[in-house]
Amino acid sequence: MKQIILYAIFVIFFTWNPAFGFLSGPIAGRTGAPDDICGTKSCNDPPVCHGSYNINSGPASFFITAPSSYVLGETIDVTVSFSNTGSGLHGFQLTALDASNKRVGIFQSKDNTVQTEAYLNEYAAHTTVGTARTSWTVQWTAPLANVTYPVIFYAAGNQADGEGTPEDDYIYNTAAVIIQPTSTPTPAVTDGECDAETIQLSQNLLELQKGESREIVITVKEENDCVAGGVSIKATIKKGKKRISLFPESGTTDEIGQIAFTITAKKKTGKATVVFNADGIKSKLKVTITSK
């Protein structure tokens, strides 16, 4: 999944220079989540940020490993990792938002490579000791209630060269979706009792690089929060057919009222719009395609 909104914009994570003192952990709000400090505007300008390379353009892979679902109130392990990297210094920041962009759950560290208390347990990030690692595992305690599903983990990572400046560090971002709690009973869906009333997208804005693919989760509900399973959803590219493709073009929501569509960026940069239609109820996804 992605992103749901993932923006290619991050300020410096850490460096040896005291003027850019994030070796011990970045300032909160650097994950690329929709409501973060750098969530909707570019922070990719020297000298205060990493401007040498585009986001996700480095040789490494950066990803989140988490269960696909959870139980309300349970504590699970979430791992943020780099692979195929030859650098000696790495860092990360992680947070969790629900579909209404409300920060949810509580993060707790498992060892001295991760810190959470400095961020009021709403974020997890590397410590100074943790910069020697390429993988970090943190505990996340799920909320007990009042969550708009699905929950999305957003993370950003820094593959640093250790030269003490913002230049020549590779910045990455990624996201992972965790669906409705497995302990929540699925309301019965009977003819005429739970029709489509709202369409919730895992994100309403999406930024992709050329050739990149991301998954959008659609949740269909009635006003009383009854999940609308078995509802037909049609996805149509209303603008930018030469810029993106989608799969599938139509489908049916599952027993918890959800269906996923994959959006793939083609070779042409610019804007595109996808409209999702369920029984006449519509929701738009705005897509921006950028070059690598």
Image (cartoon, grey):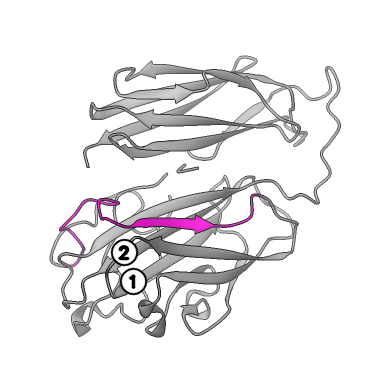
Q: Is residue 283 above or below residue 139?
A: above
Judge by depth and name the residue closer to the eye, 83 or 31.
Answer: 83
Looking at the image, tell me whether mark 1 or mark 2 is earlier in sequence order. Answer: 2
- Horizontal and vertical percent for residue 268? 23, 26
Q: Is residue 262 above or below residue 183?
A: above
The residues colored magenta run: 48-68
Within 10 angstroms of label 1, few (less than 14), some, or many (20 or more) residues?
A: many
Residue 174 placement, left or right of 269: right
Within 10 angstroms of label 2, few (less than 14), some, or many (20 or more) residues?
A: some
- Specify whether residue 234 is in view: no
- Specify whether residue 224 is in view: yes
Quadrant in the rendering for residue 127: bottom left
Q: Is residue 100 above or below residue 73?
A: above
**Which residue lies under the disc numbered 1?**
90
* Residue at disc 2, secondary structure: loop
**Which residue lies under the disc numbered 2?**
85
- Horizontal and vertical percent for residue 271? 29, 27
Q: Quadrant of the C terminus?
A: top left
* Tally of marks: 2
Asked if the stretch drawn in magenta spans residue 92, the answer is no
Q: Amino acid at mark 1?
A: His
- Horizontal and vertical percent for residue 250? 57, 18
Judge by depth and name the residue closer to the eye, 120 or 69.
Answer: 69
Q: Are marks 1 and 2 in contact (CB under 8 Å)?
A: yes
